[in-house]
C-alpha cells in the first residue's frame, strides 16, 4: 500500500510539472488571435475576441485558472471547434489507443520469437534477424508508411491506403478491429508503428537470452535433464519478463507520440491527426489537453507496470513491504 501511495504521489508531481511546462511552452508560441480574427477587422472586434478567449488576463492567472479547470476535468473550449477540449480529445482516443495497442501486439508477436531465436542460435538466420533489427532502428516512420502504401496499396492493391474501417460499439467505445475490413485498414498503420518496437524488442530479447544462458540457474536446469524448449520457455523467458514489460511500458508513450506521424500518413482519425490540426491553428486548449492526456496515460501505464513487478518477482514485493 505504501508503495502505491508513493507512486501515486510521484505521478501527481509529474503531472503538475508537465502542466506547467506545457502551459509555458504552448502559451509562449504565437497568438491564435492572428488566425481567428479577420486581418481587416477593427480593434474593437479584435479586443472582443481576446476577451472571449481569456487572453487579456495575466499569464499567472491564466495558468491558475487552467489548473483549476484541469482538476475539475475542464481545460476550456477549443478555439476552432468551439467545444470542450477534453471530450473532443476523448472522442479520438479509442482510435489512437487501438492503433498503438495493435502496434505493440504486433511487436510482441514478431519481435519476441525473433529475439529468442537470435539469442539461442548463431547462424545466418540469426544474423539476418539482427540486420533486420538494425534496419528497423534506422528507417524513419513516415518513409516506412509511404513505402508500405506504395507496395501493398498501390502496386499489389491488397490493403487500403488509409482511413479507418467500419467501427462497432463495445461498451460505448468505437472499435474497428472487430471486423475483417477493419483489420485491413488497421494492418498497414499498425505495422508501420510497430517496426521500431519490433527492432527494439529483438535487441533486448536477444541480449537477455544470451546473458541468461550463461547463468547458474540455466546450468542447473540442464543438469536436471530439462530440455532446451522448457528451459527457454519457463526459466529464461520468466526472467526476461521484467525488462520486456518495462520496455513495453516505456514504449507505450513513444508509440502514442509516434502515432502523430503515422496517423497523418494514413489519414487515421485519432488524437495525433487532431493535434496536427490544432498546432496549425494554434488551438491552445486542444494542444494542452492532448499533451496532458497522453502524460496521464503514460503515468498510469507505468504505475501498472510497477505493480506487475511484484507479481513477477516476489523479491520486489517483499522489498516494497519492508520499505
Image (spheres, helix red, strand yellow):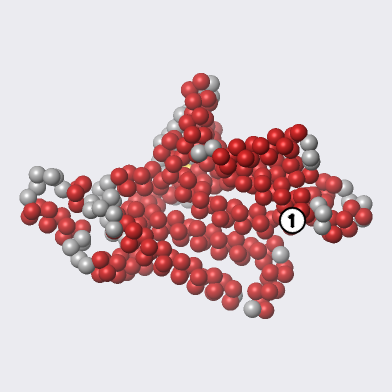
* Viewer-nearest residue: 317 or 183: 317
Where residue 245 sits, quadrant-wise, is: bottom right
Q: Against 137, is 218 above or below? A: below
For the point 85% across and 59% down, the residue is 216
Q: Position of residue 62 (x, y in %)?
A: 26, 66
Quick check: can you spot residue 320? yes
Q: For the N terminus, which image quadrant? A: bottom right
Mark 1 residue crowding within 10 angstroms, few (<14) / some (14–19) / many (20+): few
For the point 33% across and 67% down, the residue is 67
27 vs 219, left or right, is: left
* Viewer-nearest residue: 224 or 136: 136
For the point 72% across and 52% down, the residue is 208
For the point 46% across and 40% down, the residue is 262
Q: Position of residue 223 (x, y in %)?
A: 92, 55
Q: For the C terminus, which image quadrant? A: bottom right
Q: Residue furthest top?
A: 155
Q: Position of residue 180 (x, y in %)?
A: 54, 33
Q: Secondary structure at mark 1?
A: helix
Q: In the rendered image, which residue does mark 1 sit on? A: 238
Q: Position of residue 263 (x, y in %)?
A: 43, 40
Quick check: can you spot residue 173? no
* Viewer-nearest residue: 238 or 164: 238
Amino acid at each position: 500500500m505504501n508503495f502505491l501511495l508513493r507512486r501515486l504521489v510521484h505521478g501527481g508531481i509529474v503531472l503538475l510539472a508537465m502542466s506547467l511546462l506545457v502551459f509555458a511552452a504552448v502559451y509562449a508560441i504565437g497568438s491564435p488571435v492572428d488566425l481567428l480574427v479577420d486581418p481587416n477587422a477593427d480593434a474593437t472586434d479584435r479586443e472582443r475576441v481576446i476577451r472571449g478567449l481569456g487572453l487579456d488576463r495575466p499569464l499567472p492567472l491564466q495558468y491558475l485558472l487552467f489548473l483549476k479547470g484541469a482538476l475539475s476535468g475542464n481545460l476550456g473550449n477549443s478555439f476552432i471547434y468551439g467545444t470542450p477540449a477534453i471530450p473532443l480529445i476523448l472522442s479520438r482516443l479509442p482510435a489512437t489507443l487501438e492503433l498503438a495497442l495493435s502496434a505493440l501486439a504486433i511487436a510482441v508477436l514478431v519481435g519476441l520469437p525473433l529475439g529468442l531465436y537470435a539469442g539461442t542460435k548463431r547462424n545466418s538466420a540469426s544474423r539476418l534477424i539482427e540486420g533486420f533489427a538494425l534496419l528497423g532502428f534506422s528507417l524513419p516512420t513516415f518513409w516506412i508508411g509511404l513505402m508500405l502504401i506504395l507496395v501493398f496499396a498501390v502496386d499489389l492493391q491488397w490493403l487500403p491506403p488509409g482511413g479507418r474501417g467500419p467501427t462497432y460499439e463495445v461498451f460505448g467505445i468505437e472499435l474497428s478491429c472487430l471486423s475483417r475490413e477493419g483489420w485491413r485498414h488497421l494492418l498497414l498503420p499498425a505495422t508501420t508503428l510497430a517496426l521500431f518496437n519490433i527492432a527494439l524488442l529483438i535487441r533486448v530479447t536477444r541480449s537477455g537470452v544470451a546473458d541468461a544462458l550463461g547463468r547458474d540457474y540455466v546450468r542447473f536446469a540442464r543438469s536436471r535433464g530439462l530440455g532446451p524448449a522448457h528451459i527457454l520457455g519457463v526459466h529464461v523467458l520468466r526472467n526476461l519478463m521484467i525488462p520486456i514489460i518495462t520496455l513495453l511500458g516505456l514504449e507505450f508513450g513513444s508509440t502514442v507520440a509516434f502515432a502523430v506521424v503515422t496517423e497523418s500518413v494514413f489519414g487515421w482519425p485519432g488524437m495525433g491527426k487532431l493535434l496536427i490540426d490544432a498546432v496549425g491553428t494554434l488551438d491552445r486548449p486542444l494542444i494542452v489537453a492532448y499533451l496532458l492526456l497522453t502524460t496521464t496515460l503514460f503515468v498510469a501505464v507505468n504505475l501498472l507496470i510497477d505493480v506487475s513487478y511484484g507479481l513477477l518477482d516476489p523479491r520486489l514485493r517483499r522489498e516494497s513491504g519492508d520499505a
